[in-house]
Image (spheres, grey):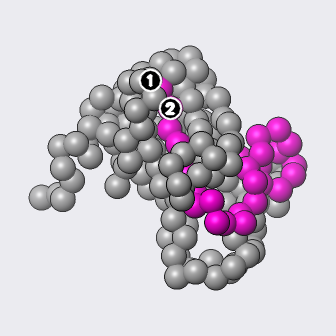
Amino acid sequence: MNNLSPRSLDLGSVTSNLRCAIVAGSDQTLVVEYTAGFSGVDDTGSLKFVMRYATDCGTPQFDDPTAANFTTAVASNGARLQLRYDLKDNVRPWGKTIQVKVLQGYLREGDTIRLVLGDRSQGSSGWRVQTFLEDTWELKVLVDRFATYVYEPLS
């Protein structure tokens, strides 16, 4: 028996590799994987990975794979993705946003998008996590399944 509601199964699910104590200000590689639910994600639908505005994590960048904070995303089915970062693209206090948009193609149930902050595969030093201590640091994930700009939060 699982504790997932029918709605959460429809939206999909998220897993992450960093669910432990981390040294403040250190360079890390954060891998977040979204698995599409029953409805999938339509062409031009998107995901938002949002952080609180009051964090000083490194700014994700998508152009220089050898520089710090290099960030990538790939769809398991080969769909073409577009990545964008905006300081204030979500409701406060969760302003800092990485948007991953499905440009060509779509996701069916079970397809995945894998976001890697601090992708070290081409020489980046990783992604600098925030420099100040907190009991927890959260990354929220929202999905616009139907390309209607209605973002629903995932558990």
Q: Is residue 106 visible?
A: no
Q: Residue at x 50, y 38 (%)?
A: 47
Asked if residue 154 shows in the view, the reply is: yes
- Precedes in sequence: disc 1 or disc 2: 2
Amino acid carrying mark 2 in the image: Ser
Give the side of residue 51 with respect to residue 60, left or right.
left
Q: Which mark is residue 46?
A: 2
Question: Magenta span covers which residues?
Answer: 45-71
The answer to whether residue 49 is magenta is yes
Structural crowding at the residue carrying mark 2, measured as other residues with C-alpha within 10 Å and reported as few (<14), some (14–19) or many (≥20):
many
Q: Nearer the viewer, residue 93 or 155?
A: 93
Number of numbered callouts drawn = 2
Q: Residue at x 82, y 61 (%)?
A: 125
Left or right: residue 70 compared with residue 3? right
In the rendered image, residue 133, in percent from the top left (x then y), is placed at: 64, 82
24 horizontally vs 5: left or right: right
Identify residue for label 1.
147
Mark 1 residue type = Ala
Q: Is residue 51 magenta?
A: yes
Q: Which residue occupies the extreme front position in the image?
A: 92
Crowding at dot 1, Cα within 10 Å, few <14 / some 14-19 / many 20+, comes out as some
Location of residue 37 (image quadrant): top left
**In the displayed structure, would residue 56 be above or below residue 142?**
below
| Side of 148 relative to 138 (left or right) | left
| Magenta-colored segment: predominant secondary structure | loop
Q: Secondary structure at mark 2?
A: strand
Q: Please say if the residues under marks 1 and 2 sit with CB atoms less than 8 Å apart.
A: yes
Q: Quadrant of residue 129?
A: bottom right
Tell me how far mark 1 sits from mark 2, CA to CA.
Answer: 7 Å
Indicate the secondary structure of the residue bearing disc 1.
loop
Vertical side of 32 occupied by 109: above or below:
above
